[in-house]
Image: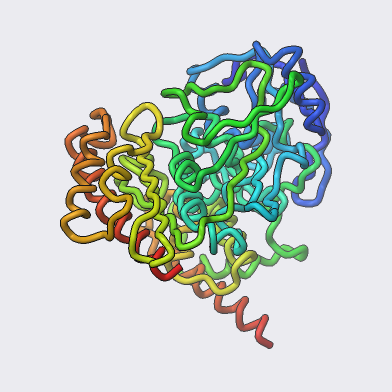
Amino acid sequence: MNILSNFQYHAPKTKAEVLELLADIGDRSKMLAGGTDLIIMLKEKMIETENIINIGDVEELAGIKFTDEGVEIGACTKIADIENSTELVKDYNALVHAAGELGSYQVRTMATLGGNISHSSPAGETPTPLAALNASVVIESKRGTRVVKAEDFILGNRKNVLEKDEMLTKFVIPAPAANSATVYGYIGLRNAMEIDAVNMAVNVELEADKKTVKSVKLVMGSVSPKPIVSEAVPALLVGKELNEDLVEKIGEAAMSEAKPISDIRASAEYRKDVVGALARRLTKEAYELAMEA
Amino acid sequence: MKQIITLNINNQNYDVVVTPMDLLVDVIRKTVGLTGTKKGCGQGDCGACTVLIDGKPELSCIKLAVASVGKKITTIEGIANEDGTLHPIQDAFLDHGAVQCGFCTPGMILSAKALVDRNPNPTQKEIKTAISGNTCRCTGYINIIEAIESYANSVAEKEAK
């Protein structure tokens, strides 16, 4: 009668209880946060599990907290709470923008930031801005705590660094550097309820002269099993002032690093072109914003 | 595996027997018998199953009933006035011819109500964004957007007074 295969349901109320459960049954459990990916995968029989651990009601895992160093966002913070955060918009607009482009409003009120990266879809909206903003991912288990960079969290299509007894508990995003700006952009088939063909986030930091590029981090999503942090773009741009000639070269460099596939959403050829267009557009946008920062 | 849980739906507590696998939409429709909530795609795409959970629109076809314990669930049956007259947003949908077959209407109305609750002065773009997860295959959305605009205007006017 049930469309879902049998599982046992666990609803811990504290992080300590979750870690205890994971140490015990983590190897035969799935974590439920918002469920917008998990329940669909269970319905479609893409996965089966003996246990569901619902972490959606663990209050200490949710929330946006500003610190002296930047901001901490709990793993179970809803995407809609990021989208609607008037405090995050100023310094972390790239993440707020990406959050607002995920699914539909209903999906965003259910889905969580931790869930979006833990699902580790190559087309996820938030891993690219998190990486561009130099976010760290805090991972905990009964054995202890470790921290990885956002760009190192996803290993491949639906694969990430989490061990069976571990969970993602929060994101730590540093305050933006002086004279810097980060922007996000994407191309998809529609404006809503689509899965990105390509998404990208670019963080440009300028020297005190507000012209010379001190650092640049260009991260592209949906063009490889995991987000790609460009190496070629910083090599071209650091120490220079942006000009039209460089903008063209940045587009070509990003295209040369993208490794897209053809699928139902876009052809590999089209995706490469989009990478070039987004790289040119977003780098220019971030550079101009950084000049005014 | 069966257990009794209490769900608060439209301010009334229902003790229902469920398994952990039961989806909220099925419990609302089959066990409780409130069939205003529709089941469309079953994958969280079409929005017909939208209900409000603690005032926020969620998709009951991809939500476990057991994960809804302790929360205030509002279905389309719960938004009319106590005397049985319609909620102003329901009136607005009728006045603007925003209903044809009616299958998307409960979800559409709940998404729209949640929007105006959090943002009494939505732009047309914000309205479109708020209902982008509610698929209508009859009306072409124009009358629906007009209905929501008119309801939002009436709420804004009331607040201004």
Instruction: Kindly give the residue lying farthest to the bottom in the view shown.
Output: B161
* Residue at x 48%, y 43% (from the top left corner): A126
Q: Quadrant of the C terminus of chain B?
A: bottom right
Q: Nearer the viewer, residue B2 or A179?
A: A179
Total marks shown come to: 0
Q: Nearer the viewer, residue A130 or A271?
A: A130
Whether residue B72 sits left or right of residue B36 in the image: it is right
Residue A184 position within the rendered picture, expressed as x and y whole percent measured from the top left:
40, 52
Q: Quadrant of the N terminus of chain B?
A: top right
Residue A269 position within the rendered picture, expressed as x and y whole percent measured from the top left:
17, 35
Q: Relative to A210, does residue A61 appear above or below in the rendering?
A: above
Q: Nearer the viewer, residue A268 or B20?
A: A268
Q: Can the viewer see residue A111 in this picture?
A: no
* Residue at x 34%, y 60% (from the top left corner): A212
Q: Relative to A99, does residue A35 appear above or below in the rendering?
A: above
Whether residue A283 sits left or right of residue A21 in the image: it is left
